[in-house]
Amino acid sequence: MKYDRFVDLVVIGGGPAGLSTAISAKKNGIDDILLLERELCLGGILNQCIHDGFGLHLFKENLTGPEYAQKQIDELKTLNISYLTDAMVINLTKSKELEFIHRTGHKLIKAKAVILAMGCRERTRFNIQIPGTRPSGIYTAGTAQNLVNLQNIKIGKNILILGSGDIGLIMARRLTLEGMNIAGVYEIMSYTAGLERNIQQCLNDYSIPLFLSSTVTEIFGKGRIEGVNIGKVDKDLKPITHSERFVKCDTLLLSVGLIPENELSKKAGVKITDFTGGAVVDSELQTNIEGIFSCGNVLQIHDLADYASLEAKRAGYFAARYIKSKQKRYNRYKINFCEKIKYASPNYIVENKEAIIVSFRIKKPAKNVVLIVKDRENNILVKKKFIRLLPSELIQIKLEREVKSDIYLEIE
Amino acid sequence: MCKNPYDVIIIGAGVVGCACGRELSKYKLNVAVLEKNTDVSEGISKGNSGVVHAGFYVPYGTLKARTNVEGFFAIPKLAAELNFPYKKIGKLVISNDKYGLTELKRLKEAGDKNGCIGLEIITEKQISHIEPKVKAKYALFSKETAIISPYLFTIALVENALKNGVDFFLNHEVIKIWKDKEFFVQTKKDTFHSKWLINAAGLYSDKISCLAGDKNHKIFPCRGEYLVTDKDNEKIINRMIYPIPPKDGASLGVHITPTTDGNILIGPSAEFINNYGLENTKQFLNEMKEDAFKMVPELKRLPIIRTYSGIRPKLIYAKTKKDFRDFVIEESKTVPKLINIIGIESPGLAAAPAIANLVLNIIGNKENLNKNEQFDAYDPKKPDFQSLSVEEKKELIKKNPDFGEIICRCETITKGELLNAINNPLGVKTLDGIKRRCRAGMGRCQGGFCTPRTIKILRKEYGIKEKDILKNENNSNLFFGKIKE
């Protein structure tokens, strides 16, 4: 094969994870980096997140999405890291050959290591199969955010939001501020999917009604959406008969979950876990394919951009170490978890001398619980009390002690 | 451009109307096609399984059988001339019991009699050899059954007909027809007149026949719902998988059909309705998944990315297999020179070219037809970036950098392809029209990422105001304008 270029490290994606991981790899001694971004400018979804609340963990200041991105972009440029926008990777192999296309041509490159940072996409009405007609005026919250914030487009006048994911909550406030009416936020679960602070700052502060255990059971309208049926659901999330009522709206926004965008990863043979939709990784964020790392929302859905960036920073560090040392892979231990936990990441632990970060998400809200991390000999590695645990929160814990066996996460 | 009065007016730009238009453009005739929607292929022609049936489902000696088999042989030639997606992938009609085996044998006999080729009854071992993920004892293997993109087929017929002089009038809903030696057809926008009137109005063909003075037809709408899976990259199945047709005679049963783009269709249901609503219902979506997963359990692994529905124009409220009605393709018995094409349900897609031929013969029997010497049967293939080799990709981007810019990441659709779609010869600028022509927005994110980019191009490069951008029909505006002027 004739390669157009050899590169030490290719980072796929220029959002909060991709930028952070490239910067981190550079700071850890890798000079030959190429970052590829498929959109027209760097920053990823941050560019359309014009609200504040970004950067509190990474930069210790309160920034808007574009400000947060700009800080990362400035650093990327200061560090002379090369990047290409409007460059879409269309193929990736397990021997780390990448095919990408750009207005300047079709390129084939070979990398020593690849970091996947492609982010995620939104679930659509078809993924959750909402019955009814298929009129215009139905948008995922993130698409609506792009149209409203970046293109100055009035997407509707009377807007109903299904799902209490963070983007939906943010959009409820945003559209209210732009003079549109929010006909309500409806959530199928008995608790919210978004962060507590967003419920307060985006809904409660604007008196936007939130309806729990309720979902859209049918969509009406020919041409443009005219309204939906809302039904209450029981404990098993099945609609309760005769609980349906018609609610008028001219727009439906969906904030019903995010899916890591791993189609490219699969092409390289990267193993995906059904728990997160992200890659199976070890504690160094390396996938089952040697030299391919994964971080940010393509690995697991994070609550905050800061957390995606921080995870990516670690991926950059480990990828740099991999490139420099070309070390053989260590033995791995498995991370197991109890029924109450939805998932834990990473999936494996590399024999280690340094601290390991494990993140997990709970299945249902819980109060006054204790998280215990044990090894195979029942030695307690971590014991942490939580007054409250919510499914909307990705909890991170640090294992300071050296791990020498499989570990088990338990909630009591 | 308008050649009023016309020799022939065709009402309805579905696959049948457009096939007629293209067939008639081979002769020196002034032809107009009137369509009420904002685009062609908006009705039955877009809401079906996209199958070119071989011809074993239909009784011998009927118009359905004759046009099906004739059309089946005509479509590959058309696909070569017009460059629409056509794949001869084959089909298995499967069964697990002796009753089913009898039915399969009956289907094969019917097919053989109708003139189908490539039919064979096979058993478990052969089935698992060619389709390892399908568990069945018996199957009718139809090697020749093919799939096409039904809307791209229709669009290809339109674009070729346009090139050969046929006029197309979109947004022209017919509201009145009268006859005074010739036909006068009044639409919401204009009045047309012609010697011949072809009623290819699909679901509304009974109403159009009525407007023209022939009240002898009635359509019973029968809705079929579908689910679309994400791309079957692992090739869980390679062929169409069908059950034994249910006893109600209303449908062929919920089947599993690969599309020419690599997705899989699950469906359709069969439900008589008293309107023309295209809803999807929870009940049928769930039932169809169950039915399909029984035939191929591994399909469960593919995410559902879309649901849709279509409506069959039935001529009877079918309850048993005896409730058979043939296609109506004839000059009206009460209104001379009105050609009614009514009740074109399955296998209408495959039959369309043959139906057009029959229509031509009806006109030819009463008129002296002269060949259109300028007729050009061919339409060049438009670049389909994803299907090109690396060398071809490099070459194309070098020639036109727009092919190096990806707009739709899920389907890998370039700006070059998008612009080709937007610049379609019919001038359709609806989002669905663009989507069907180039697949931007047809993938797993359903336009979440590419819609903003497409909208930007429509606004900035074509000067279309945000409030004027339509999804499909006339009141399907995507937006209410700008937030701040």
Image (cartoon, grey):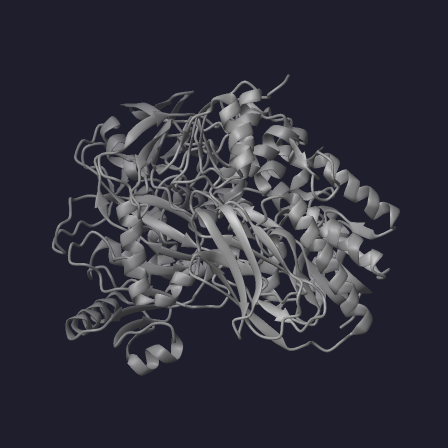
Nearest the viewer among B174 and A151 is A151
- Decide if residue B436 is on the left or right side of residue B120: right
Residue A79 in view here: yes
Nearest the viewer among A232 and A1 is A232
Q: Is residue B107 above or below residue B357?
A: below
Q: Position of residue A235 (x, y in %)?
A: 30, 45
Query: On the rendered image, what quadrant is the C terminus of chain A found in?
Result: bottom left
Q: Position of residue A223 (x, y in %)?
A: 41, 29
Counting labels gives: 0
Res A90 → quadrant: bottom right
- Decide if residue B392 is on the left or right side of residue A134: right
Q: Position of residue A267 (x, y in %)?
A: 60, 65
Q: Is residue B326 above or below residue A213?
A: below
Q: Residue at x 37, y 58 (%)?
A: B52
Q: Residue at x 51, y 20 (%)?
A: A180
Q: Position of residue A213 (x, y in %)?
A: 35, 38
Query: On the rendered image, what quadrant is the N terminus of chain A found in?
Result: bottom right
Q: Is residue B119 above or below residue A46?
A: below
Residue B372 in view here: no
Q: Is residue B390 above or below residue B118?
A: above
- Decide if residue B148 is on the left or right side of residue B388: left
Residue at the bottom extreme, as displayed: B125
